[in-house]
């Protein structure tokens, strides 16, 4: 039997991921704190806590993967066929830095920002959806989540 206390604890656990907007790493610290305090009292809170923490860790992996792809592409486009020369005043001059390169860099930056924004919007919607499911007494399993905690 799932009690109202269990439902409220699960809702609070899900919504605590939004503390990331006020505290650095709040989306990891507060759910882990609530989960560790309530997991032995309720199997419902334990399952939802694991799901929320695994989802936040999965999002971190996805953000890092985007950066691992975007940063080398960005740096490659900056330094590809660019010659740096030292003039008489000991200033470095980048030659062959054309508008085409700037356009490519802007495109890479815009795509990266759009991917980050899409992940944040998806995160926001799924956390709200999970909280609603928890309020109805259902265990919510996030999509595309890597199970770090089993």
Image (cartoon, rainbow, N blue to C red):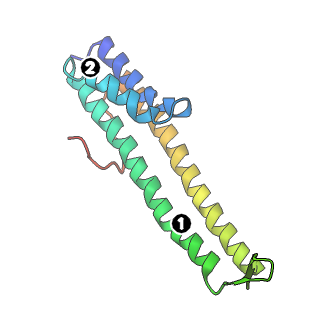
Distance from Cα at disc 2 to Cα at disc 1: 40 Å
Instruction: Report the side of 51 relative to 40 (left or right).
Output: right
Answer with mark 2 or mark 1, whichever residue precedes in sequence.
Answer: 2
Residue in the foreground of this view, choosing between 107 and 11: 107
Q: Position of residue 1 (x, y in %)?
A: 21, 16
Q: Is residue 94 above or below residue 18?
A: below
Instruction: Report the side of 45 relative to 12 (left or right).
Output: left
Callout 2 secondary element: helix
Q: Position of residue 79 (x, y in %)?
A: 61, 79
Instruction: Report the side of 121 relative to 61 (left or right).
Output: right
Q: Residues within 10 Å of mark 2 (few under 14, many from 20)?
A: some
Residue in the foreground of this view, choosing between 92 and 128: 92
Measuring 50% from the left and 45% from the top, which residue is drawn there?
122
Q: Mark 1 highlights which residue?
A: 70
Quadrant in which residue 90 is drawn: bottom right
Residue 38 — which label?
Answer: 2
Residue in the foreground of this view, choosing between 43 and 34: 34
Measuring 77% from the left and 78% from the top, which residue is drawn there?
99
């Amino acid at each position: 039997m799932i009690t109202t206390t269990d439902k409220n604890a699960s809702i609070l656990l899900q919504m605590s991921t939004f503390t990331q907007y006020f505290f650095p790493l709040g989306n990891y610290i507060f759910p882990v704190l609530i989960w560790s305090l309530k997991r032995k009292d309720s199997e419902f809170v334990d399952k939802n806590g694991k799901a929320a923490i695994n989802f936040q860790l999965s999002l971190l992996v996805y953000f890092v993967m985007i950066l691992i792809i975007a940063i080398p592409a960005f740096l490659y486009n900056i330094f590809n066929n660019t010659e740096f020369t030292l003039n008489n005043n000991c200033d470095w001059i980048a030659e062959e830095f054309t508008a085409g390169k700037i356009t490519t860099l802007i495109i890479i930056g815009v795509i990266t920002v759009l991917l980050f924004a899409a992940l944040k919007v998806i995160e926001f919607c799924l956390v709200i959806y999970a909280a609603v499911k928890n309020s109805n007494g259902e265990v919510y399993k996030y999509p595309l989540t890597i199970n770090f905690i089993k």
